[in-house]
Amino acid sequence: MKLLEYALLLSCMAAAVCGCACGNTEKGSDSTQAEQSVKVDLNTAVLLDVRSPEEYASGYLQGALNIPHDQINAEIAAVVPDKSAQVILYCRSGRRAKTALETLRAMGYTDVSNFGGLEDAQERLGLPVVTE
């Protein structure tokens, strides 16, 4: 009986892993389908542009803060100390935002979404692009 229970447990675990991997299908610019329907409260969400400072200076979404993706682990706590705060990420294509998302989740941030590239995020959030 123990062998049967063990086999059943392994089957369930394998199905769960496959379900998680299969349900996380990439769409568009590295944002998941689930993230396509994320509801954002622009009054409380933290909008992060994870591009380089030079890219950010060339145009960013109104209200977005700039923390380059390769510096997010060192700088995020000063900007977003609450790990349950809603954090919306974007970059040029979504790839660096995906890397930043993975870093933030590994650090314990629970409400993080990749909105893809600047244009994708602008379209979804309805915010203007600010140029310096």
Image (cartoon, helix red, strand yellow):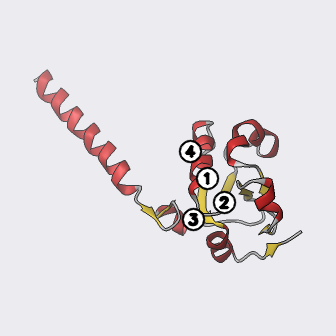
Q: Which mark is residue 102?
A: 4
- Which of the marked residues, 3 or 4, is nearer the chain's N terminus? 3
* Number of residues whose C-alpha sits closer than 10 Å to that of mark 3, classed few (under 14), some (14–19) or many (20 or more): some
| Residue at the disc numbered 1 | 96
At a point 61% along the width and 72% down the height, the residue shown is 120
Q: Is residue 80 above or below residue 22?
A: above
**Is disc 3 in contact with disc 2, using a CB cutoff of under 8 Å?**
no
At a point 68% along the width and 54% down the height, the residue shown is 87
Q: Residue 76: horizontal and vertical position, in percent?
A: 75, 42
Question: From mark 3 to mark 2, how far is it between C-alphas?
Answer: 17 Å
Q: Is residue 21 above or below residue 4?
A: below
- Which of the marked residues, 2 or 1, is nearer the chain's N terminus? 2
Q: Which mark is residue 84?
A: none
| Residue at the disc numbered 2 | 91
Question: From mark 3 to mark 4, how far is it between C-alphas?
Answer: 17 Å
Q: Amino acid at mark 4?
A: Glu
**Is disc 2 in contact with disc 1, using a CB cutoff of under 8 Å?**
yes
Q: Is residue 46 above or below residue 27?
A: above
Q: Which mark is residue 38?
A: 3
Question: From mark 1 to mark 3, how far is it between C-alphas?
Answer: 19 Å
**Is disc 4 in contact with disc 2, using a CB cutoff of under 8 Å?**
no
Of residues 31 and 105, the one nearer the viewer is: 31
**Is disc 1 in contact with disc 3, using a CB cutoff of under 8 Å?**
no
- Which of the marked residues, 4 or 2, is nearer the chain's N terminus? 2
Q: Is residue 79 above or below residue 74?
A: below
Observer-side mark, 3 or 2, equals: 2
- Which of the marked residues, 4 or 1, is nearer the chain's N terminus? 1
Q: Quadrant of residue 106?
A: top right
* Number of residues whose C-alpha sits closer than 10 Å to that of mark 2, classed few (under 14), some (14–19) or many (20 or more): many
Element type where label 4 sits in the image: helix
Q: Residue 86: horizontal and vertical position, in percent?
A: 67, 54
